Structure formats: C-alpha cells, structure tokens
Image (spheres, coloured by chain):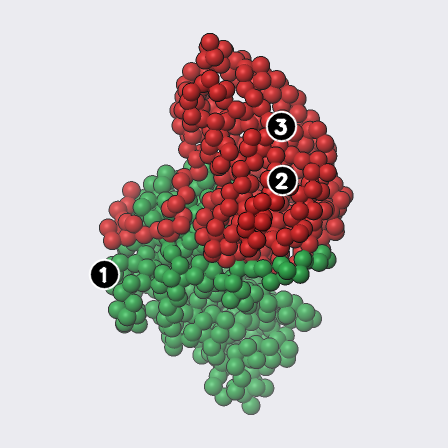
Chain colours: A green, B red
Amino acid sequence: MQNVKPALAEQHNTQLAKILPSPIRVIDAEFSEIPNLIKLTLGEPDFAVPEHIKEAAKRDIDSDDSHYAAPAGHLELREAISDYLVNRFDTPRYEPNGEVAVTVGASEALYATMGGLFNPGDKIIIPTPSFPMYDAIAKILSLEIIELSTAPDYRLTPEKLAPVLEAHPDAKGILLNYPSNPTGVTYDAAEVQALADLLGQHDLVVISDEIYAELVYDAPHTSMAKLLPEQTILVSGLSKSHAMTGYRIGYVAGPQALLQHVTKMHQFLVTTAPGPMMAAAIEALKHGLQDAEEMRDAYQARRDLVLTGLEAAGFEVARPSGAFYIFAKIPASIEMDDLAFVRDMAEKALVGVAPGSIFGAGGEGNIRLSYAASTEDLEESVRRIQAYMADKLN
Amino acid sequence: MQNVKPALAEQHNTQLAKILPSPIRVIDAEFSEIPNLIKLTLGEPDFAVPEHIKEAAKRDIDSDDSHYAAPAGHLELREAISDYLVNRFDTPRYEPNGEVAVTVGASEALYATMGGLFNPGDKIIIPTPSFPMYDAIAKILSLEIIELSTAPDYRLTPEKLAPVLEAHPDAKGILLNYPSNPTGVTYDAAEVQALADLLGQHDLVVISDEIYAELVYDAPHTSMAKLLPEQTILVSGLSKSHAMTGYRIGYVAGPQALLQHVTKMHQFLVTTAPGPMMAAAIEALKHGLQDAEEMRDAYQARRDLVLTGLEAAGFEVARPSGAFYIFAKIPASIEMDDLAFVRDMAEKALVGVAPGSIFGAGGEGNIRLSYAASTEDLEESVRRIQAYMADKLN
C-alpha cells in the first residue's frame, strides 16, 4: 500500500462523500462470507448471453472494430435501437442521428442524462422505493431530491403524484422506473396514460428508466416515450433483456433539443461505448427478440414459485408484474427492522436478500428478493425461508 | 424528429453549455467532406489489435464472462496492471485491492478522478497546450482552471511551474500529460525528477496522464508514480500502446486514501467496465509487451519521416520525443491564424491537421499533425504540404 501525503488524506468531493458505499454491494459482500448461503440480493440475470449474440461480438472483434466509434455509438446500433423501439413499443421513430445515443450501461445513461440536463440545486422528483443509484447520482450532481413514497401499495398514481407536482412547480425532472426495481410493480396502458396526462400538464423532464420493459408478466409494457415523447428521455439497455449486464450497453432516446446535451455529457464521461459490445447489442435487437421472450417465460415461472412461497411463509407481497424482484413486507409481529431481519435470516435461514430501507422512503420494513437465480436455488430458498418464518412466527 | 415541449427546449446543464462541441471532431467532420483529403487530425492508432489479444477477448466471451465484474474491474486485470507498472516503470507495487481501478478508457479515468477528488471552485493547474478534454471535464465540474502556457518550447520546467504554484498555494490539483498530446514533448528522468521535487513541496494532487508512456523514442519513460507516489494518481490505458481505442479500457492507480473516492465516483458513472474488453487488456499487459514495442518502432520511423518533411517545408518543430503528434509552428511570414491556415491547407493541399489554438494557451499559431497514419499517407502528405508551403512562402 502507498502512503498518501498526509495533507492530501482528506481530499475528496464532499457531495460524493455523502453517499454511503453502494449499500446493496456492502450487504452482498457481507453475505458472501456466510458458507452455504443462497444469495438473492443482486439484480443480475443468471442466464448466459445467447450464442448468436456472442458470435456477433466475436465476428466484430475479428473484423477489427477496434477504433473509436462515433460519440453517440455505431450508427447501425442507433438505427437498430430506433427500429426496435418503434416495432416493440410503438414509440415515435427516433432519428438515429441526434435522438439516440449508446451509453456504457443504463448507469452511464442516467448519469449523462441528469448531468447533461440539470444544474446544481434543480429539484428532481424520485418516487420511492427506488434503485439507489438515482439518489446517488442526483446527490453527486447537487440536485435537490424530492422523495415521493409510493407506499403502501408501491404504485405511483396521479393521486399521489399531483400534490407533489403542485407543491414543487419548479421541479425540473422526475425519474420513473417501471417495471420497478425494487418492487416489481409495473403499470398497464391506462395507468401509464393517466400518469402521462398529468405529467404533460407540467414542465418537467420525464426520465423514464424502462430497462426491465421486456420482463413483464401480466400485461404488455407501455412506454412513456409512446405517450409523452416531447418531454421524455427514455433510458434502457440490453443488460436485463438479454442477460448482457457485463457487456455494459445501454441507451437513451429523446427529442434532440434535450438529447444533444445528454450526448455531449456522455462524450466527456466515456468518449464512446466499446465497439464489440455494440455489435452484440445490434445482434440482440435485430435477431434476439425471442431470447428475451424465453428468458421472460423462465422468470415468470420463478416469480410464481417465489410469490406463492413467500405468501405461504407469511409475507404480504405487492403483486410483482415485472422485472425480477419481489418486495415483501416483514410481518408486523416480527419486531425487527429490515436490516436486522435480513441479517438474522441470512444467518439462520442461509438466504440473503436486500433490506427494503436502502431503497428510500416507504421501503422500510420490507425485503427485496431477486429471483434472477436458478429454479433449484429458488426452490431451496423458499423451503429455508418457510422453515425460518414458521419458527419466527410461532 | 420529435418535437420537444417548448417549455423544456432550453433545459440543460449551464456548465456543460460553456464547452463547445469537441473542436477536433468538428474540424475532423468538416475535413471529411473534402474529397481526396488525407486526414491527420485524430490521435488514433491505425494498427489493428494484435491477434492474441483478440483471441483472448473471444475466449472470454465464450466463457460467459457476461455478468457484473467488481466495480473496480476484474481482480486479475488489477493484478496485471499492478505487475505491469512495477516491471515496466519501476513504480511502487500498487495493491490490486484498493489502489487500482479499471475504467472505460482514460476519459472516464479522468472524469472519475477529477469528479471523485475535487469540489466546485477548487483550483486545478493545467499546463497548456493540452488535450481539450482536461479543460472540458474541469469546466463541467465547475473547477477553477489555472492555465499555464508552456510556450515557446512546450516543455514544463520547475522555472515555469514554481511561480504558478506560489501564486496559487490553494491549488488542489495539477494535470500532467507526458508524452504530451498535442506536442509530442516528453521528459527524461532528470526532468521528471525536477518536477517531482518541486511538486512534492506543495500539497496538491498530481494527476499524471501517461497514456502514451509506451510511445517514447529518445529516452525511457519515467513515471511520476515512481517518483512521487504519495500524491500521484496515475492515469493510463491500453488505447495507445495496443491500438485498443475502441475497446475502451483505461485505469487509475494511486494511494488508497485518494483512490477510494475515484473508484466510488467511477462506480456511479458506469458501474464497471465490460468483461470481454478487460480480458483483452489482461492479455495485452501479460503477453503483449512486444506488440507495444513493434508499434513504437513503426511510429518512430513515421515521426522521423514527418519531422524531416515538415522542417524541410519551413515549419519550426519542438522535437517530438513521444506519443504520435508533431506540433509545428506556422512560419511568421504566413499571416493567417492557425484555424484559417489549417482550413486553407485542407482545401489547397488536401491534408487535414488540427489547429493549435484548440489546445489552449500557447497553442495558437501552430498545427498538430497526428502521424498515427499509414506510411504511404504520411509520405504523400509530406509531399503535398511541401508543395503547398513552397507556394505559400514564395
């Protein structure tokens, strides 16, 4: 280890320091130390990338696609994204030159969007419970975060949203995420339309993170980009639909007046995305729709397994209609906060899940279970949780 | 094209808006419209990635390395970086856990470093002419930039640096880059030692961008990380040494007290780097030293060709001992600013180079020529430039 010059030991960005180290990863690391524990903490597909997509990446490597791509990404990928969004979700046709940019995962898409569009002190509404990275990025950028708890049913409705919009007429943006991490809640067409109608009456940018759009189980996905394109920045990527998390390809689409700033920010963050990984994304979007469907069917079976199992174990669960998470309320008779509870369950039941409180207001008293895991592990986890809860509730 | 909601048409980060679109790329795009023009504007290797490195990436894809890596990157790569730095540049041994992080190119390394360590208003010294991204990132982060012109010989010396350090005792950081883009200037061991001695007397973080370290022609590279490890963040990557620009793998190394903040920032920017591209980097660092040497020898021959040719054409050139750029002064008798000159030369000589003024104070009145191009193109360019200059100077 190198010694730091003592005078520099405290040199750091003070906004960044306000953010605790990624809490899910801290707990995940803690659970990794417990032998025989089954971890259902992280939201990561257990599938491999489909073979034809891997082959496309390898062919691209062979073809020496190793020079800088355009800042917004390979044009062929931007075209494939534009076509995919129209064909799959009936969005307007985004112009590949100017209205689409390829990013390093949805993470960088979120940073480039918030960093490109907002200024320190700008108010941004974040419905919670939510993916902790929204809050973290907003804090780093010195945005003022308006939390909007969607508890107890974890559904964002015009009734919950309207008073917050009225109380903050100067809000510059809102972050939507459906299907939702961590709750698995999503919305049908009428519900999205109702939100779009309300948001359309207010002058704020809607950042709609729809990365789980291919993973819906009860109704088709309706994109905010279809209903409110003039004020929506759509954020998505290939990580969840095609199990390509490690390939790190995400994207943004939106009106050029806004997207130009997002793309510019993106350029100063990473220059451009890696070529061979973009080639994989082209293949996934052009010839991989069926892969996404097969994975979705597998996740749906797992959801049913875990949902039934958790309800039988005594948890109250907001029906998860998308993504691969179940958000379950710890029974009131168990007098532990969610962090103590998940630690206790990890130790005694050897199943690791995330504590709900790390997802913001309204999340406390819940656990988040990711069913992006093998069916065997999920079956065994349900058995262990049921035995643990039977003991706990007696 | 989508219409944006009129009330949102001007929504953007005002700091970001202060930065003009990447000026090199604007000019490069302009020159792309001129038929038969040879472009020597961008700093991008024309070599392909060596076969064994491509094979390593493909094997990694086959092995299903498609899940999230650790935020700081695959441990095997961090170990390879640490070993490489010790073996190649005699740096201290950086601990792979905590003192090394893998980034999406050196660009993201720079953003994560400045974003992780500094606060709005912090002063940062940038010797110029310099890579425009330093200035851009500092502006986005609202840092106060202290420009230090190294003209006329483009060498940073203690004599030039000391008064700036004394005038700004509260400066939090300095950005070094050697071998330098855009000048090709680099420093021998005694010169680096003299700078390190001076910098060691001041309490500021030294961000040392040594991405061109493998491309030195007259003397071995001496790393600031060797001489001043307690206050240096070393920034580098594989883009220039192994022609891997499009793979987007960079890295940072430094004392944990500082690097922890850089790594944390990195995590919120991009989560982690893409796995298969990291596998390529492991192979390059472990088994690709000779590739870098072969490319260096080729660049050196090209440098000699272009240097001789430009001097014969009437340019005064600061001897370029590294990287793949030549920075040449436009003869005083030509009464045009550098932007007008490069446009005139593009039109009349059909050779495109970058105007020196885009690299900051001291760059005006120069051109930057990138010799990361084929020998044939360089030979033809020299002929064209010589004919053009003969005409111009008569």
Distance of label 1 from label 2 (alpha carbons):
61 Å
Which circle, 3 or 1, is nearer the viewer?
A: 3
The percent position of residue A336, horizontal first and vertical second, equals: 53, 84
Amino acid at pointer 2: Glu
Q: Secondary structure at mark 1?
A: loop
Residue A36 or residue A5, whichever sits in front: A5
Mark 1 vs mark 2: in front: 2
Distance between mark 2 and mark 3 Cα atoms: 21 Å
Whether callout 2 and callout 3 share a subunit is answered yes
Horizontally, is B348 left or right of A248 in the view? left
Q: Quadrant of residue A34?
A: bottom right
**Vertical order, B363 against A27 (above or below):** above
Kindly identify which numbered label has been placed on residue A163: none
Say left or right for B86 vs B308.
right
Residue underneath mark 2: B159
Q: Secondary structure at mark 2?
A: helix
- Please state which of residues A289 and B122 is positioned toward the viewer in this rendering: B122
The chain under label 1 reads A
| Kind of residue sitting beneath label 3 | Pro
Q: Position of residue A271 (x, y in %)?
A: 50, 42
Q: Which mark identifies residue B320?
A: 3
Location of mark 1 (residue): A201
Crowding near pointer 3: few (<14 within 10 Å), some, many (20+)? many
Instruction: Give the residue displayed 56% in from the left and 36% down from the top.
Output: B150
**Which of the chains bears the disc numbered 2?**
B
In the current view of this chain or complex, which residue is farthest to the bottom? A394
| Residue found at x 23% / y 61% | A201
Q: Are discs 3 and 1 less than 8 Å apart at CB?
A: no
